[in-house]
Image (cartoon, rainbow, N blue to C red):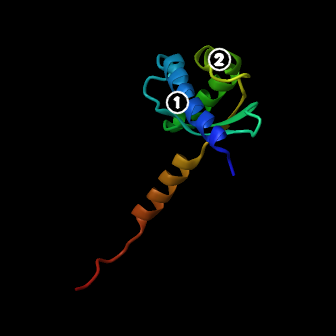
Amino acid sequence: MESKRQQKVARQLQKDLSDIIRRRMGDQFRNTIITVTRVQVSPDLSVARVHISALSVDKRQKVIDYIMDHKSEIRKSLGLKIGKQVRKIPELVFIEDHGSQYASEIDGILSKLNIPPKEE
């Protein structure tokens, strides 16, 4: 169970990372919705696991690769934003979130089902 401090830092990181990623990637991935779906912070606040979701199927891997290649610059931008609020800027571990992909697959399966209407 996360402490209140972990939850507070995680919420702030989610907000700030969303803003940083949106600004940094806005021009390159114009028609792709990139979301920071969840952030988990270690008890000592030194590591943050950042779950990323990209809603464009064809650009998903390019988005993840771009984020991985620019991880140090994203962390530096984060440090400029939250440097006065925390002692140490957490190490960022980016994880691809497949939740939206699973949801669209299930939605597709459900739309193919032939369910007769309920008789009254």
Looking at the picture, tell me which residue is in the foreground, 85 or 68.
Answer: 85
Describe residue 114's horizontal placement relative to residue 51 as left or right: left
Tell how many labels: 2
> Residue at the bottom extreme?
120
Point out the frontmost of discs 2 and 1.
Answer: 2
Q: Quadrant of the C terminus?
A: bottom left
Q: Secondary structure at mark 2?
A: loop
Looking at the picture, tell me which residue is in the foreground, 19 or 88.
Answer: 88
State the residue at coordinates (67%, 24%).
86
Label of residue 15 in the image: 1
Q: Secondary structure at mark 1?
A: helix
Q: Amino acid at mark 2?
A: Gly
Mark 2 to mark 1 CA distance (whole Å): 15 Å
**Res. 5 in view:** yes
Give residue 107's quadrant in the image: bottom left
**Res. 96 in view:** no
Tell me which label, 2 or 1, sits earlier in the chain.
Answer: 1
State the residue at coordinates (29%, 77%).
117
Mark 2 and mark 1 residues within 8 Å of each other at the beta carbon = no
On the image, the x and y values in percent for residue 68 come to 69, 25
Label of residue 105 in the image: none
Label of residue 83 in the image: 2
Q: Is residue 71 above or below residue 108?
A: above
State the residue at coordinates (63%, 17%).
84
Assess disc 2: are there few (<14), some (14-19) or many (≥20) residues with their C-alpha within 10 Å of its C-alpha: few
